Image (cartoon, rainbow, N blue to C red):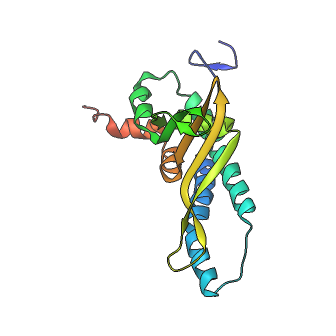
């Protein structure tokens, strides 16, 4: 056995889950704080301003950070059969094939691992905004649209809350929780 293998599998350095949790927390904080900030700005309570492009750039950076770290973690369990059903349960949005620039074909569920891939390989990102009541101000919804092309053009509609929740919950912890207790 080489020094690069452990238990017959390539050795992958362990992922620091605190980094995933912190990036996910920051990501969710941007979305959850945005509505409150916009409401207070509308009332004149605060004058703080952050350009939308800065917020959006930070969101993209944090999405990529979580996606890359999670993929590195997931890679270490890729061949573990007990995790396959758990992987399939982790739905983080929808994936659409684009027939042309104006028409989507019916979508399919976007699983966590594929969601990470779409984040990493996206060529364009767009955001959903809601409008505050009785105001012309808008705030971010925790939904991101990712666009790219691999053989065919695609759009992934990513639910950011679910994505962060799954990223912060290790597969092996869920597998242990679902396992029957050991009889002695």
Is residue 182 toward the left or the right of residue 54 in the image? left
Residue 67: percent from the left, percent from the top?
62, 41
Is residue 72 toward the left or the right of residue 182 in the image? right
Q: Residue furthest left?
A: 183
Dividing the picture into quadrants, the one containing residue 82 is top left
Is residue 130 toward the left or the right of residue 152 in the image? left
Q: Residue furthest top?
A: 1
Dividing the picture into quadrants, the one containing residue 172 is top left
Relative to the observer, which residue lies in front, 82 or 65? 65
Residue 33: percent from the left, percent from the top?
58, 69
Q: Quadrant of the C terminus?
A: top left
Residue 96: percent from the left, percent from the top?
52, 35
In this rendering, the answer to whether 140 lies above or below 136 is above
Relative to the observer, which residue lies in front, 121 or 127? 127
Identify the residue at horizontal 42%, vertical 32% (top origin): 88
In this rendering, the answer to whether 40 lies above or below 123 is below
Relative to the observer, which residue lies in front, 98 or 182? 98
In this rendering, the answer to whether 18 lies above or below 182 is below
Is residue 74 something that shows in the picture? yes
Is residue 65 something that shows in the picture? no
Count of marks placed on residues: 0
Identify the residue at horizontal 57%, vertical 33% (top origin): 98
Q: Quadrant of the N terminus?
A: top right
Identify the residue at horizontal 61%, vertical 82% (top origin): 42
Residue 177: percent from the left, percent from the top?
35, 40
Identify the residue at horizontal 59%, vertical 69% (top origin): 138
């Amino acid at each position: 056995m080489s020094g690069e293998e452990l238990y017959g599998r390539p050795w992958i350095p362990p992922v620091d889950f605190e980094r995933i949790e912190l990036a996910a927390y920051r990501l969710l904080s941007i979305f959850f704080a945005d509505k409150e900030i916009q409401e207070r700005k509308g009332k004149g309570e605060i004058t703080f301003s952050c350009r939308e492009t800065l917020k959006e750039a930070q969101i993209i950076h944090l999405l990529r950070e979580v996606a890359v770290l999670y993929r590195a973690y997931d890679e270490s369990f890729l061949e573990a059969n007990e995790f396959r059903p758990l992987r399939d349960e982790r739905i983080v949005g929808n994936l659409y094939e684009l027939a042309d620039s104006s028409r989507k074909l019916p979508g399919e569920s976007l699983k966590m691992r594929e969601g990470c891939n779409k984040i990493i390989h996206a060529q364009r990102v767009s955001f959903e905004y809601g409008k505050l009541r009785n105001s012309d101000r808008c705030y971010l919804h925790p939904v991101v649209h990712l666009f790219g092309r691999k053989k065919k053009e695609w759009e992934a509609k990513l639910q950011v809350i679910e994505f962060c929740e799954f990223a912060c919950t290790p597969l092996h912890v869920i597998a242990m929780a679902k396992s029957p207790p050991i009889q002695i």
